[in-house]
Amino acid sequence: MMNGDGTPLLQARQIRKQFPGVLALDGVSMHVAAGEVLAIVGENGAGKSTLMKVLAGIYSPDSGELLMHGQPLVLRRVADAMRRGIVLIHQELNLAENLSIAANLFLGQESNRLGVGWLSRSKEREQARKHLSSVGLDLSPDRVVATLSPGQKQLVEIARALVHSATVIIMDEPTSSLTQRETDRLYQVIADLKQRGVAVLYISHRLAEVKEVADRVTVLRDGKNAGELSRQEISHDAMVRLMVGRDLKQLYPRTHQTAAATKPAPLLEVEQLTYEGNPQPISFVLRPGEIVGMAGLVGAGRTELSEALFGIRRITGGTLRLAGQLVAIRSPIQAVQAGLLLIPEDRRLHGLILPFSIRDNLALPNYDLLCRFGWMQPGRVQELARRMMDKLRVRAYGPMQPVGLLSGGNQQKVVVGKWLARQPRVLIFDEPTRGVDVGARSEIYALMDQLAGEGVAILMISSDMEEVLGISDRVLVLHEGHLAGELSKAELSEEAIMHLATGGGKRAS
Amino acid sequence: MIRLLGVLVVVIVLYLAMIASDPNARTQSTHQVLAGRLGSYGVLTLGVGVLILSGGIDLSIGSVVGLGAVCFGLLLNRGVDPLVAACAVLAGSMGIGLAHGLLVTGLGLQPFLVTLCGLFIYRGIAKWSTQVPVGRGSSDAMRLLLVGGEGDGGRNQILVMLLAAVLLTLFVHGTRHGRYLFAIGANENAAKYAGIPTNRYKILAYVICSMMAGLGSILYLLENGSADPTDAGSWLELYAITGAVLGGCSLRGGEGMVPGMVLGAAVLPLIRALCSFNNVGNEIEFAVLGVALLLGTIADELLKRGTLRRAG
């Protein structure tokens, strides 16, 4: 897998990167050769993204070194990396949506013949067409990027990397919003890139894809190298073993399972619910003490359903009953009053006010309990913050630390803590452990288990198959906005979920 | 807190510089004039400051002052009781704020644009309602109370402003409603997901801002004795925003303190006084103001980076 002279194209040695409150990379090393596809896998928070950002010049490492062709490489900014041919394609693509494809391809290196920034349109268009066809896109360079599908945008990003004569292309979760056909197309393009001698770093948590494309796998865990697998050694189990590094049972404690056994009366009954963006009625129930997983592919409408239940998305039909009582939820205000609470998918955007302190975030939805005649009672606020921080074991300097400076796991604990003062009845966790390190993950699972034990009904939306299989008592699978099926604990398997999630329908059992 | 200390130091330095620059600066009348200006600017600064910390902006303040002053004068000239007239002006300005709030929340229009349109509309209505400046009729008692007697520079306005500042401090920093305004300014989405009726609070912020502009319009007419529909109150929105920003409000929302707004409002009158005592021509006054705001902004940014680095 090395070049003729045995030196890797790009190499990282003992990279260390510390962020406030979290050691993201603790001596990570990796190398990749020209024409090789190296997959980097690891759980959320294992340090994949940080490593990528170090390689792309976005972060500079605290210590350790980068080598290119065996020569030390110092990247102070993204432009340095680009100049050396290292291009990172972000998960959320970085295209100027309202410019044309051609304009995007040459953004930052417009042809500059006259030396005055004059753009030679015809030249650009011609060049653009060439690069587009090399990634198998047959589109006019004048098309505005906003009109493209996610898969096409992905390919435009790759074409842009080629414009920058990239020798190393880093793809961060490239398939997260692609259809199967677009994914296949991407694989072809990756094979082409290999032919041209481009090194590809492929970051993904979809292990099936990794098996498909990778020549070699480097596994990260908790910011360290957990192991490496050669082409022959790559298997799903081998990767999971290295990623998790422990027995799964330990990670997913499930002590209270009375609900599954005794089938108490439903706490939340969703009947024929339709909502903005989804005209297909959905019905299901949640029982107290239950953790119900909700699986589905990206775009299956899971987050939309949670938004409808929480009053963010307008409900257009059907009924919701809480403990038998009909409830009308028109906004989060009613949902919160009813004790139907959401831990949103994007905690930085929806769950937290980053510049606010831990204390103020925890207090935010609870001021009705923390005020007397509308006046805030600082003593009560402080007491709540201390109690929640203890209960959830939030690791911070103190309640006044801004949440923006906490690690993902601790931020997530604060989001959960916001609701615990209110005696939740139904808790919806949307991707509860995304970007959360392994240690905090097990604490969050333990907390979910404990809450279920106290009689809370939990709906856990997750794309993390391990987690869905690990902690759910029962799993609902969505496919294109409708409930494709339900799987009991006994029927649970990754295969059964994927079968439903991909529109296969429930198998006769 | 550091921000508050910073602006306090600036105000003290400006004041001492003014005192030191000319013996006339130490007289009682100078202080009365200063108090009057601080009062009249401060009222507007407080209003827009509360709006800014909730993530909004209002460019129509000067026109609301103009229209309010003209309407107040017209009512007084018709023999309406000053108290009734003042209440009508306050109610009308609150109506303007309500309209701004509804347009911003209901239709999702940009605050900058909505209030920019307001700036033209209210000025236009003021000009249309009277072609000549209007006087203040028989409102002597009210003037004596809110502004002060003839020749004392409108000193009582500072008391009106301080009273408003105390009330707003309690509201913004002491009640949950104030906390919600900060939360909305810092991250409206997160506030919504926390079950806060964000639209209602945004509307409230616009109402407070325009109500303070209405109060400013009453003070304006009482102090100046007449209001010219073509220019009464013009530029005041920019003075108010400048004061709020100097006082620590971030235009990004979610940041600011009421006492800081009061101090920020003091910077402008002090700079003007400093210019005039040092015989710097009126012509250059705006440039000095602009530079002061720029320096304040730069200092704030550097301070913020320093804090982040320490926290990191």
Image (cartoon, coloured by chain):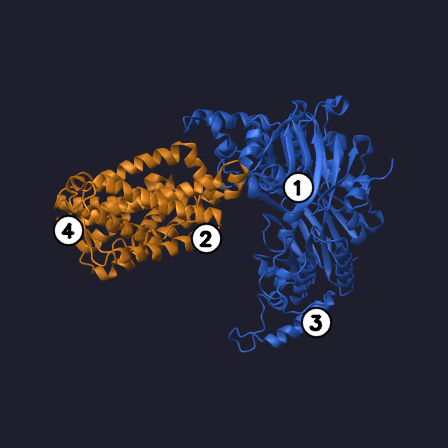
Q: Is residue A408 above or below residue A261?
A: below
**Disc 4 secondary structure class:** loop
- Looking at the picture, which amino acid does disc 2 mark? Gln
In the rendered structure, which amino acid carries the disc numbered 4? Asp
Q: Are marks 4 and 2 on the same chain?
A: yes
Q: Nearer the viewer, mark 1 or mark 2?
A: 1
Q: Are marks 1 and 2 on the same chain?
A: no
Is residue A108 placed above or below B200 in the rendered structure?
below
Q: Which residue is at 62% across, 73% downward?
A: A124
Q: Find disc 3 in the rendering and name its residue.
A: A130
Provide the chain ID for the residue under circle 2.
B
The verdict on a common chain for dots 1 and 3 is yes
Q: Chain of mark 3?
A: A
Image coordinates of residue A491 in percent, x first then y, are 82, 33
In the image, the chain rendered in orange is B
Q: Nearer the viewer, mark 3 or mark 4?
A: 3
Q: Nearer the viewer, mark 1 or mark 4?
A: 1
> Which chain corresponds to the colour blue?
A
What SS does tag 1 mark? strand
> Circle 1 marks a residue in which chain?
A
The residue wearing badge 1 is A274
Mark 2 crowdedness (10 Å alpha carbons): few <14, some 14-19, many ≥20: some
For numbered disc 2, what is the local secondary structure?
A: loop
- Residue B22 is marked as 4
Mark 1–mark 2 Cα distance, whole angstroms, equals 31 Å
